[in-house]
Amino acid sequence: MGLRGHRTATASGGQTVRFLVALIGPAHVAFPAHWIRGILTLVEAGPADLLTWGDISYERTDLAGRLTIAPEIPTTDTRIILYSNDQRFRSFMVDGVLGLVDVERMQIQALPPQFRGGERVRLLGFFADTAYIALIANPFWVLELPPPKNVLDAFVLQTPERRGGERDARPRLPSIALEDAVSSSAHVK
Amino acid sequence: MLRAQLRRQAQVGTKSTAEARMQGLVVFSVAGHRLAVRTDEIGGVMPWPGATVVLTSDTPFVTSLVRQDQRCLPVFDLAARFSRIMHENEPLCLIVNHVDGPLAICIDSQVPSLHMVPRSAMHYCVGNDPDIAGTCVAGDEELPIINLTTLGSHRSVQ
């Protein structure tokens, strides 16, 4: 589709989840893309604690701090992510945006059971790309909402086959504006 | 014919009894700390695969993932468990048959050695440390026997 920073990490059809992959410190963190409302530069976001964009106010949250990851010093790659499920609105800083990636559901792995602490709440699991391993942030935890069971099922984008007449109730990306934002923000480290 | 068969069976029986009295142990070191582990607790030894992905985990000593072949394994920081720091340039990766699934441990570059030890040389004891099963004499050394299959599972998590 000619979108820089958007690619598919799957070879075959099947259920996929679209993620925005961002850098926070040394970690690649993936956010289910369906709740991303925008990607801003530091200049666009401004310094206020309550970030207003498109008549909607997004409360800032120190996601790096909550993940106990030391962030990098802000650079021209630093971005502010606007994240919302239309009930709760949060914005947070990332050190860079790699792009959108569609990941087959089967390639998403849960955290191994040896991880037994709060990381199981913060992270839904991970997926391995050829160049990196991305940790999947729990979008409900990001928005400080109680998580339902089977969180990722709410973000599945595609099914391989549907019977005739069956309505497509799959969630859609909020708008093409997200892809445009990623296109202008994505960089490769 | 029957007598020869009986003699052969007796020899096999003697050999298997002797084997039953021996225990296979792998001796390895972590940041210079030498340990012994039963061979059936080890899934393999290979060069350390490379960079780890840190999760900033709350689980003591289980803080990262490492890519190994087609899979990603949790890493147990055994050096930190013994309050030591690894200074190896080319460490090895010990794959553990942990009760919760395969687990990777970064160990010293000195290749682990295999020892067949008489069971009489193994002294199991219940101490304060649930990760240590007891001690054994392997070669000329008396070494702690570590329970790798249950490593960390006794520890409470915040």
Image (spheres, grey):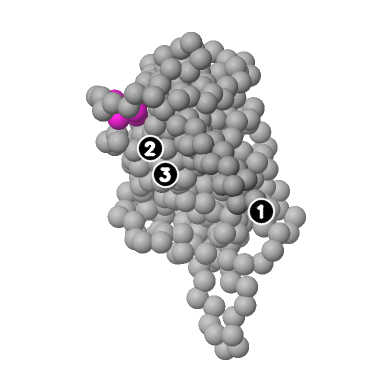
Q: Are marks 1 and 2 on the same chain?
A: no
Q: Which chain is home to disc 2?
A: B
| Other residues around mark 2 within 10 Å, as few (<14) / some (14–19) / many (≥20) | some
Q: Mark 3 or 2 closer to N-term?
A: 3
Quadrant of residue B92 within the rendered picture: top right
In terms of secondary structure, where does tag 2 sit?
loop
Percent coordinates x, y for residue A43 in the rendering = 52, 35
| Chain of the residue where label 1 is placed in the rendered structure | A
Q: CA distance from mark 1 to mark 2?
A: 35 Å
Please give the residue where the numbered disc 2 appears in the rendered image: B150
The residue under label 3 is B99
Is residue A23 placed above or below A100 in the rendered structure? Answer: above
Contact between marks 3 and 2 (CB within 8 A): the answer is: yes
Q: Quadrant of the N terminus of chain A?
A: bottom right
State the extent of the magenta-drawn residues as a range. B129-133
Q: Amino acid at mark 3?
A: Val
Which sits in the foreground, B47 or B51?
A: B47
- Element type at mark 3: loop
Which of the two residues, B151 or B14, is positioned nearer the viewer here?
B14
Q: Position of residue B130 (x, y in %)?
A: 30, 30
Q: Is residue B131 magenta?
A: yes
Q: Identify which residue is drawn at 75% across, 55% down.
A: A2
Give residue A9's mark: 1
- Mark 1 vs mark 3, foreground winner is 3
Quarter location, residue A119: top left
Query: Is residue A66 something one can see in this rendering?
Result: no
Q: Amino acid at mark 1?
A: Ala
Marks 3 and 1: in contact by CB < 8 Å?
no
